[in-house]
Image (cartoon, rainbow, N blue to C red):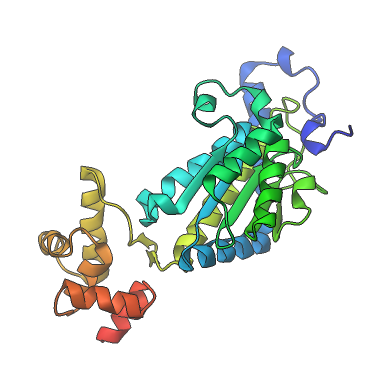
Amino acid sequence: MAAGRTEGRHDQASGLDERQPVDVLKVLADAQKVAAGAVDTALADIATAARLAADALLSGGRLVYVGAGSSGLMAMADALELPGTYGISRDRIVILLAGGAASLEDLAGGYEDDRALAVGDAAAAGIGARDCVVAVSASGNTPYALAIASHAKEKGARVVALANNPGAALFEGADVAILLETPPEVISGSTRMGAGTAQKIAFNMFSTLVGVHLGHVHDGHMVNLKADNIKLRGRACRIVSDISGVGLDEAERLLQRSEGSVKTAVLLAAGARDAGAAEAALDRAGQSLRRALKTLG
């Protein structure tokens, strides 16, 4: 089996273990920076993927993240943040990590080779035609990710494939192929490093753009956040205050009237008759706060 770039040898690896600690860290830091730059050539594909995912959510479908090992952890981290950051219902986000909960205690490698496990996980998740599946694998050849991507295509779902090797098998048949062509790892094959860094950046960008498409971002504010702790309730007040121009005390009062909805509170500050009228304006505007505000102007 031919090794891809993710299994190659880094040109600074020779004698690494004999260098001074700070010199080792300098090599590692420089490699991370180079890996991060791999995202720049994938922007158009990330944008296309975000549009597919947003359309799936808008049509009543789900966003399904798929991966194994460290790549799976990158996917899971992105998925877990979406409900709190953008208020996307938890039941609209599915995480298929090879090995499931067991992998959170012991990230054993055998799970990623188990195609039967993958098909069983996909079937249990009920992947269907309205869903968008995002499958990630550094090598692009992980059997678990490949099997679920294939199953998803058979069920009519849209498939986004993200990998770090050109010509990855995962790209075959995908609706969108996101290539993050990172260089060989300083610690050969340890794709939690450079490849993982590039994946994390790409996922951050992807999910943020999904939030923008869904109308959950306004002037850099997360206006659909789930304010379920002291810190986030304070942030919600500041967002309402910043967008509407009211004081923090008034922002807090408006949030109470809107049952914690930032968008509704802003519309109340802008002159909406009541929370019901504000929510109706949002519905007519496709949940875009900016468009809803214009209807009140």
Q: Residue at x 21, y 64 (%)?
A: 241
Up/down of 264 relative to 62, above or below:
below
x, y percent for residue 226:
30, 52
User: Which corner quadrant of the image does residue 48 belong to?
Assistant: bottom right
On-image quarter of the N terminus: top right
Q: Residue at x 65, y 44 (%)?
A: 136
Q: Residue at x 10, y 59 (%)?
A: 249
The extreme right residue here reads 2
x, y percent for residue 199:
62, 44
Q: Residue at x 31, y 79 (%)?
A: 292
Position of 157 with respect to 9 (left or right) is left
Which of 231/24 is in front?
231
Which of 294/185 is in front?
294
On-image quarter of the C terminus: bottom left
Can I make out residue 72 in this image?
A: yes
The extreme top residue here reads 18
x, y percent for residue 83:
38, 51
x, y percent for residue 235:
26, 52
User: Which corner quadrant of the image does residue 8 belong to?
Assistant: top right
Up/down of 262 relative to 10, above or below:
below
Can I make out residue 31 in this image?
A: no
Which of 22/236 is in front?
236
Position of 139 with respect to 78 (left or right) is right
